[in-house]
Amino acid sequence: MAVPGQNANAAGYRNMHQLIQLRWIAVVGQLSTIAVVSMGFGVQLPVPAMLQLLACLIAFNIFSLLRWKEQHYVDNRQLFLALLVDVFSLTMQLYLSGGMTNPFVFLYLLQVILAAVLLQPWSSWTIVVITGACVAALALFAKPLPLPLDHGRGMSSLYIQGILISFVVNAALLLVFITRINRNLRAGDAQLAGLHQRAAEEEHIVRMGLLASGAAHELGTPLATLAVILGDWRRMPEFARNPELLAELGEMQAQLKRCKTIVSGILMSAGEARGESSAKTTIKVFLDQLVAEWRASRPIVAFEYDNHIERDVPVVSDSTLKQMIWNVLDNAFEASPHWQRLEARREGDALVLLITDGGPGFAPGMLDQFGTPYQSTKGRPGGGLGLFLVVNVARTLGGRVSARNRAEGGASVRLDLPLASIALQPEETSHAA
């Protein structure tokens, strides 16, 4: 399961790629500006030195692209260093092209705003101090551009035109990249909120499992006592001579046996005595037996079962998986006692189970909160836990559960389970043999 730190790193990784894209735009922009200013306007610039600096920036960006393609761990320090490289590159280009008289000196604001959005507070303030020091150094040491002081000409002034271009570039880059970065941060926050919700749900499951396990242990003794009493009754002459009473006793013993099976299943699902009834089988046989047991223990009217699995997979029969599928079938049975359908097929490396019923379907609010505990239309306390457990068991196995209402009426629940999570591994196969 992912953790909050990993989500932050995922957002940092995406933001690092935003900086790499921004650096490519800076390279193209600087090349274009050097060409237009030196050849179009005849301004004397140290073009060789500026091109060498651009070559270093291109090499750094290629290195960054290759590095972050293989490594996805990006933290605050690495983003801070990447922004420092951009600040240093901008400072050197401005130093070579007029310092404070270069209209593109306002691009420092882009670096400061990016730092405020991407970095932790101490790093952002460090960028502010460094950019301030760079501006002061340019004012002290850089030679001004040999441009005429023609500010009074308005838009005809070359310097005013440069200021306008600098403003438009700054505004456009900020709009595009801040929007993308905010989208990354919102996605990270949403994923973090989802993890908190999942952790709360898993804690809820643990508590329910402990409660169910304790109840199962407590039920074991009275069930065993009832089994002994019913066995004694069958041998008593009063019952032995009465066929009707014997039939009733047989039904009671069958139901008692089913109760003991349910209790054993609860204990196995809680991780106790799991090895006692685990057996090597195949997914096709496992589903056939699961359906046969479910049909035998319910007053089924009409049930369709289509097993389209052709390439079988060895598995270990698991009570948790069985109970998960039974929960969905039971919900379908309660919603539509007259008809249910189960279709099983294999799609690539996944097992797909489609459970369909002819009932009233899910309410729109139920579909929006499918799998949330205590969301049920049955009107009884504790309703909705069955589907809640189904969703979380599937999630534990690496699968997913989805639901929809059918156009012709009724509902359909789909379970997608990766076969790798339930398949019998080669080592287990050798042990089982």
Image (cartoon, helix red, strand yellow):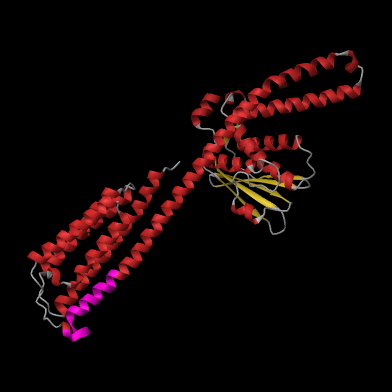
Q: Is residue 32 above or below residue 228?
A: below
Residue 249: x percent and y percent? 83, 23
User: Left of 191 or right of it: where is 235?
Assistant: right
Residue 244: x percent and y percent? 90, 24
User: Left of 147 or right of it: where is 301?
Assistant: right
Question: Who is closer to the viewer here, 57 or 388?
Answer: 388
User: Left of 219 or right of it: where is 270?
Assistant: left
Residue 246: x percent and y percent? 87, 22
Magenta part of the protein: which range?
Answer: 152-170
Q: Where on the picture, by quarter, is residue 45? A: bottom left
Q: Is residue 393 above or below residue 20?
A: above
Question: Who is closer to the viewer here, 100 or 327?
Answer: 100
User: How many marks do you count on the picture?
Assistant: 0
User: Left of 133 or right of it: where is 343?
Assistant: right
Task: Write the residue at 20% across / 59% down.
Answer: 87
Task: Write the residue at 36% across / 59% down.
Answer: 181
- Reply yes or no: does residue 216 show up in magenta: no
- The answer to whether residue 276 shows anywhere in this view is yes
Task: Write the residue at 68% across / 34% down.
Answer: 289
Question: Who is closer to the viewer here, 360 or 320?
Answer: 360
Q: Main secondary structure of the magenta part?
A: helix
The quadrant of the picture occupied by the N terminus is top left
- The answer to whether residue 397 shows anywhere in this view is no
